[in-house]
Every structure is written in C-alpha cells, then in structure tokens.
Image: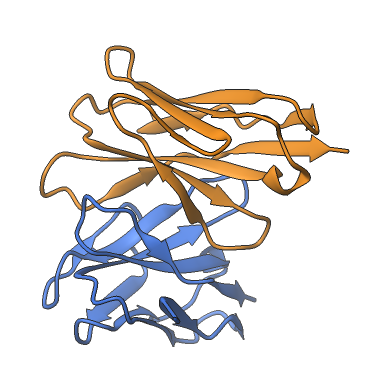
Chain colours: A orange, B blue
Amino acid sequence: RKEVEQDPGPFNVPEGATVAFNCTYSNSASQSFFWYRQDCRKEPKLLMSVYSSGNEDGRFTAQLNRASQYISLLIRDSKLSDSATYLCVVNGRGGDYKLSFGAGTTVTVRA
Amino acid sequence: NAGVTQTPKFQVLKTGQSMTLQCAQDMNHNSMYWYRQDPGMGLRLIYYSASEGTTDKGEVPNGYNVSRLNKREFSLRLESAAPSQTSVYFCASSLRGSQPQHFGDGTRLSIL
C-alpha cells in the first residue's frame, strides 16, 4: 500500500465552483500534513499546512481526519489560476525527516 | 531572495557519463533533500541530509551519491548515467524534518 494515495482526477470545474478532494495516508503515527501546489513543469510550492482542528487560507480549507487517516482540501469560488496539481504530503513522527508525497490530484478550472 | 538554487536547469548526457547536480539554499535550513519526479508518479526521495555532516538513503538511492558540502550546499552525483535516470530532479530544504520543504526549480535531465 502506498504511504499517501490521491485520486488523480482530473477534476474539471467551471469558474466560481467549489471543488473538494481527499487524500489517504497509511502511517497512523504521522504528525505533519501539508498541501502543495505544482504547476505544469514547475517545482512544488507549499499551499498550506493542515492542522488538527482544520484551517482556512482564503478560499482554501483543509481538514484532517485522524480516525480515518485522510486529509481533504476544498477550494471555493474557483479561479482559472487554481488550475494545477495538488500534492498531499505527510511525514512521520519526531526524527523522521522523510516526507511522503502523493502523486497529486489535477484540477482544471474552465472559463 | 534566492531560496533554493539548482544548477544546471537542463542537461543531456550519454549513457555511462557522470555528472553532479548542484543545490544551494540561503535560508539557513538544517535539512536538505534530493527527489526525482517521473510522469504520473509522485516525488520520490533519493537521499536526504537531516543536518550538516549527515546523509541518509531515501526510497530510490541506487545509482546516486550525495555530498553535504556545508550547511548551504547539497550535491547529487550520477557516477554512470543510465536511461532509467532520465527524470526531473528537485532539491529541497527545510528548517528541520517536520517543517515544510522549499523546492528549487528543478533540473531536467535526459540520458540517451
């Protein structure tokens, strides 16, 4: 089983729509969770960290469900510029310096 | 405001040639990482350096070596390049292992 699994999509949505997708992780001891964004042929960039109580950053909302071992990302009022691949990232406890990256969920926002 | 700088950005090699990918960060981060990314696959960790003076294997270390030259620099060496090593290589750094990683803009490597 992969450490981090994501629905690859693509999710094709019109501008202004809401889109949400999940990511599951296998290591129940994981302590840190992130969403990254990667544009075509570019480097991954941190979108937001995910906290236990859930958190928002503008139009983006992230949730963590430890019992079911998944995290989610919701994008409200989608913009054309939100078109990208979203990577779910999880790491282990304490001294584990290795982040595990999902293969990504592709979102395409159309005019 | 450079962040993580990788050189070169593009490289074409012949099978059996060697080369070193360079990475430097100016954020005073302790940990540095090398990944490869292939189409349809997630980032796979090749090697990492939790702190200056230490290096450890990641998920796919075969065919690669690394050197943590100092706190700023972490290089990746291909001793005898193979076509299977054609990929995009990313270097990243973080303040420490549990913190988010910041990426360089990648090296696109083709091996013929």
Q: Residue at x 40, y 33 (%)?
A: A4
From the viewer's perspective, tell me whether residue A56 is left or right of residue A27.
right
Q: Position of residue B28 (x, y in %)?
A: 24, 77
Which image quarter: residue A60? Answer: top right
With B45 as the anchor, is B6 left or right in this view? Answer: right
Q: Is residue A6 above or below residue A92?
A: above
The front one of A2 and B4 is: B4
B4 or A50: nearer the eye? A50
Q: Quadrant of residue A20?
A: top right
Residue B88 seen in the figure? yes
Do we see residue B61 in this rendering? Answer: no
Q: How many marks?
A: 0
Position of residue A84 measured from the top left corner of the image (x, y, whole percent): 66, 46
Residue B59, above or below B1: above
Identify which residue, A81 or A33, lies in the foreground: A81
Q: Position of residue B60 (x, y in %)?
A: 35, 56
Q: In what quadrant of the picture does the C terminus of chain A appear?
A: top right
Residue situated furthest right in the rendering:
A111
B20 relative to A14 in the view: left or right: left
Residue extending farthest front: A58
Query: Residue A7, image x and y in percent?
Result: 58, 27
Q: Residue at x 41, y 76 (%)?
A: B3
Residue, x 31% and y 32% (percent of image)? A51
Q: Residue at x 53, y 71 (%)?
A: B106
Q: In the displayed structure, does residue B15 sit left or right of residue B50?
A: right
Name the quadrant of the N terminus of chain A: top left
